[in-house]
Image (spheres, helix red, strand yellow):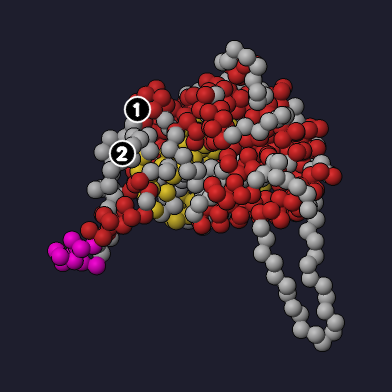
């Protein structure tokens, strides 16, 4: 067995992990990382079971794995074979060319002596942490100490401690933001090359990252719910009374220790979380990350909500609607050369003011936003269905057919023309031309062409957001909106953003930016090796 006492002290680790839960979690993630290395061909597991003679009973010999066994096996591999994924990153990613000059200047000018830990080393370590889904900084440092090739690849002569990692995130948060913004510009042409239509889309959604605060303790909410149940029983409330929804109003709007940690309704449950806004394109590649901290709220006071409404999901919708326009304003200010044409969002953005800003201020051509409330239109001389599509006056359930129109107004939105559903184009051999002929048995007009309705979308952008609601184009395009939710879940799960046990807002903000940097690194790598099918995740690409 290889002696690893110099790089990793098993006894020291067990002294630090004093409770059983911590030991179990640590062992689990170590085994998880070893499994990943096995899948990628970095480690070859030895077979501990042989085939028995025919007729014999199969006996499985069990041996409990210890941390010493796991680290010993991995140490031997790293000593004789440089991991494939490190070679891949080394050959195709020049991190020094990606880091902004201002980041270099700030990092090396903040002290009057040479840095013990190079900037590229710190960044590579944090990127690799997310690639391999290592949940904590402490566990990352364990693997850095254990693997000679890993810390040499990063550029460490000495592995830093956990406090250095935390201080790096907090001190250079704005620099990480600048690096992320630069990588957004770098990956823009790559996304255009992969799929121009998907790259021209903007998909926005908000998400919450649960904070490590007392209010997120299940006992906190359960105590309030228990009191409400007892009160309802005492007063004889009917069975329709929902104590879980009733608990929403008595609970504070934010955590006592940090007002930035807001009460949110996420995936059907209450929690106290840091809120963030994520923009992706149609490929699911992140374009912008906005952390709703104090500075952002001060610069955009119009998004601060007043008294929270009832029910709770309505509160979330209002919050999302208020946040959209300020986020887009900041996004286009940072990236003036990005000119998307299509916006996709959920029903929370179904408001006249939002449609007006999307088309007039941000110059979108189409907006795919489901209706939040029933559509109503005034001063129209035609009947219409729930999607705003003109219908036959003799058959309100029979929608008219859409025909394209080349006319454009100052809004840049083409005029929509609808014709009778019984109309057909017929070719005349005499005139050698085609014309419209209505074959309706009960015509509503004397015109042989049938009824025609011209719709001017700029008069009602909510009803006609540059695209016909309910059409095949609408249905197929709106399916793409799920990509922003996939990216958010990828950040939380694969990049271990969720469940971070930190009280510090800057640390969590930096972790979120590093998740975005890691994904964009994947995009650059996939383009360099001409495997665009793996732009969202580096793991199958390595395998």
Residue of label 2: 256
Between 217 and 397, the residue placed more toward the observer is: 217
* Magenta stretch, overall SS: helix
Secondary element at image label 1: helix
Q: Which mark is residue 37?
A: none
Q: x, y percentage for residue 418?
A: 52, 43
Between 58 and 397, the residue placed more toward the observer is: 58
What span is colored magenta in the figure? 229-239
Q: x, y percentage for residue 254?
A: 32, 39
Q: Residue at x 55, y 54 (%)?
A: 23
Q: Is residue 404 above or below residue 499?
A: above
Q: x, y percentage for residue 537?
A: 68, 44
Distance between the Cα atoms at labels 1 and 2? Answer: 23 Å
Q: Is residue 15 above or below residue 279?
A: below
Q: Residue at x 78, y 49 (%)?
A: 2
Tell me if I can see residue 397 in this picture: yes
Picture quadrant of residue 527? top right
Disc tally is 2
Secondary element at image label 2: loop
Residue of label 1: 302
Front: mark 1 or 2: 2
User: Which residue, as the protein is rendered here, is positioned at the far bottom?
Assistant: 55
- Is 296 one of the magenta-colored residues? no
Q: x, y percentage for residue 113?
A: 63, 14
Between 333 and 158, the residue placed more toward the observer is: 158
Q: Are marks 1 and 2 in contact (CB under 8 Å)?
A: no
């Amino acid at each position: 067995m290889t002696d690893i006492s110099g790089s990793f002290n098993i006894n020291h680790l067990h002294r630090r992990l004093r409770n059983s839960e911590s030991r179990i979690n640590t062992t689990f993630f170590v085994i998880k990382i070893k499994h990943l290395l096995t899948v990628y061909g970095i480690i070859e597991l030895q077979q501990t079971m042989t085939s028995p003679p025919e007729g014999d009973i199969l006996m499985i010999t069990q041996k409990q794995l210890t941390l010493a066994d796991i680290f010993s096996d991995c140490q031997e591999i790293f000593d004789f074979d440089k991991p494939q994924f490190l070679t891949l990153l080394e050959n195709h990613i020049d991190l020094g060319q990606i880091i902004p000059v201002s980041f270099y200047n700030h990092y090396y000018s903040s002290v009057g002596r040479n840095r013990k830990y190079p900037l590229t080393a710190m960044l590579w370590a944090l990127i690799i942490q997310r690639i391999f889904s290592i949940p904590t900084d402490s566990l990352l440092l364990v693997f850095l100490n254990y693997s000679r090739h890993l810390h040499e690849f990063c550029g460490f002569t000495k592995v830093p401690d956990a406090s250095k990692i935390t201080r790096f995130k907090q001190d250079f948060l704005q620099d990480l933001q600048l690096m992320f913004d630069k990588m957004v510009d770098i990956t823009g042409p790559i996304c255009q090359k992969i799929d121009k239509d998907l790259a021209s889309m903007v998909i926005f959604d908000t998400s919450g990252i649960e904070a490590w605060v007392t209010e997120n303790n299940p006992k906190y909410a359960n105590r309030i719910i228990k009191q409400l149940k007892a009160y309802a029983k005492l007063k004889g409330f009917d069975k329709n009374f929902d104590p879980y929804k009733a608990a929403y109003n008595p609970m504070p709007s934010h955590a006592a220790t940090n007002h930035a940690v807001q009460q949110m309704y996420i995936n059907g449950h209450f929690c106290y979380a840091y809120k963030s806004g994520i923009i992706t394109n149609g490929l699911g590649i992140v374009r912008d990350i906005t952390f709703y901290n104090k500075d952002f709220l001060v610069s955009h006071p119009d998004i601060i909500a007043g008294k929270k409404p009832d029910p709770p999901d309505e509160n979330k919708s209002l919050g999302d609607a208020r946040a959209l326009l300020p986020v887009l304003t900041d996004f286009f200010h940072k990236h003036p050369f990005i000119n998307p044409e299509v916006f996709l969002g959920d029903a929370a953005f179904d408001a006249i003011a939002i449609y007006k800003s999307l088309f007039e201020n941000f110059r979108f051509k189409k907006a795919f936003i489901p209706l939040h409330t029933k559509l109503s239109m005034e001063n129209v001389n035609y009947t219409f269905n729930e999607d705003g599509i003109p219908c036959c006056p003799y058959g309100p359930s029979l929608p008219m057919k859409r025909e394209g129109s080349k006319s454009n107004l100052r809004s840049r939105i083409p005029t929509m023309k609808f014709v009778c559903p019984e109309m057909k184009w017929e070719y005349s051999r005499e005139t050698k031309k085609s014309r419209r002929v209505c074959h309706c048995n009960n015509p509503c007009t004397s015109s042989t062409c049938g009824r025609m309705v011209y719709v001017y979308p700029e008069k009602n952008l909510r009803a006609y957001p540059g695209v016909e609601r309910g059409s095949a184009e609408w249905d197929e395009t709106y399916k793409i909106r799920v990509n922003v939710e996939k990216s958010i879940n990828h950040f939380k799960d694969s990049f271990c953003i969720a469940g971070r046990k930190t009280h510090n807002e800057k640390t969590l903000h930096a972790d979120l930016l590093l998740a975005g940097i890691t994904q964009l690194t994947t995009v650059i790598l996939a383009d360099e090796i001409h495997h665009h099918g793996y732009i969202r995740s580096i793991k199958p690409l390595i395998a």
